[in-house]
Image (tube, rainbow, N blue to C red):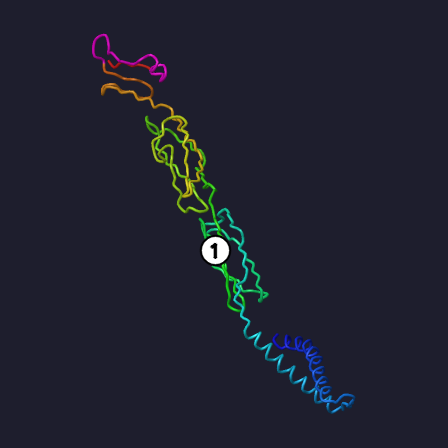
Amino acid sequence: MKNNMKNIQKGITAILFAVVIVASVLVGMAAALAVGETKTVTDTEITVVYGEIDDTIDNTIDNTIDNTIDNTIDTTPPDITCPADVTVEQATAAGTVVTLTATATDNSDASPTITSDALAIYPLGTTTVTFTATDDSGNSATCTTTGTVIDTTPPSVDAGLDKTEEQATAAGTEVTLSATVSDICDASPTVTWSHWPTAVFPHGSTPVTVTATDASGNSASDTVVVNVVDRTPPELIIETPPELIIEDDVITVEQETRDGTVVSLTPDIMSFMGYNIMYLQ
């Protein structure tokens, strides 16, 4: 680059120097002549003058350009422009991929080097990224931008299918419920139940709502219904005294008096069971 500048400036300056020096030589020759005296300039004299001109031009231009270039120092840093701040939704448990690109220009370096502390994946929250542009003279400039990852997505909640259970006791039936919960950001969302998940549910239908809340405050709910039904018919138990014998739908008792024996059987039970009464004599 330095040599190219020399050649260009040398060509321009040579013309100017030639004119000035030739004029000076001619004036000097003319001054040495008497009035009315003439002198013929030979080729040798012209060659000598040209050689002096060429040497003078070379030395002057070399020294001038060397001093100018050597004394020129690039202290101007590049002009760097950062991308605008960006906000994105969290995509995975690790975070979100965000592409941030800065640009830079420089007065002497056509392609300044740009470096940064940008991340491959940005976690939940705000991350500040610093970009640095450096030119080939070692001058540098910096700028910053931010990448913000937010979580507005609620957890996923599945309370399962409705349950139907047979009533086990007069109080109801013990039933255990469970739910499947997941979240993009929070590995362990908080789970709450509107009814204890393991409890005795009474006869009838009981809706139970499960709610999951993640660390960002997002929540979602699902409801399951527990149905306790009674499909078991009652069991008829007749308590008889030791002396009363029931066999093949025939009740046999010991006669207690001349008139017989008193047996406490209600008509509806007798009709239901179709008993026949036999008296032992």
Residue 97 location (% of width, % of height): 51, 53
Question: Splitting the image into 4 quarters, where does residue 200 fall?
Answer: top left
Name the residue nearer the viewer: 89 or 235. Answer: 89
Is 272 colored magenta in this rendering? yes
Name the residue nearer the viewer: 139 or 277. Answer: 139
Residue 129 location (% of width, % of height): 47, 55
Q: Which residue is mark 1?
A: 129
Judged from the image, the secondary structure of the residue bearing numbered disc 1 is: strand
Q: Is residue 119 above or below residue 163?
A: below
Report the amino acid beneath label 1. Answer: Val
Q: Secondary structure of the magenta portion, mostly?
A: loop
At 44% from the left and 44% from the top, the residue drawn is 183
- 164 left or right, relative to 171: right
Q: How many marks?
A: 1
At 21% from the left and 12% from the top, the residue drawn is 256
Q: Which image quarter is the C terminus in? A: top left
- 201 left or right, relative to 45: left
Question: Splitting the image into 4 quarters, where does residue 195 fall?
Answer: top left
Is 50 colored magenta in this rendering? no
Name the residue nearer the viewer: 53 or 103. Answer: 53
Question: Splitting the image into 4 quarters, where does residue 170 fall?
Answer: top left
**The magenta stretch spans which residues?**
255-275
Q: Which image quarter is the N terminus in? A: bottom right
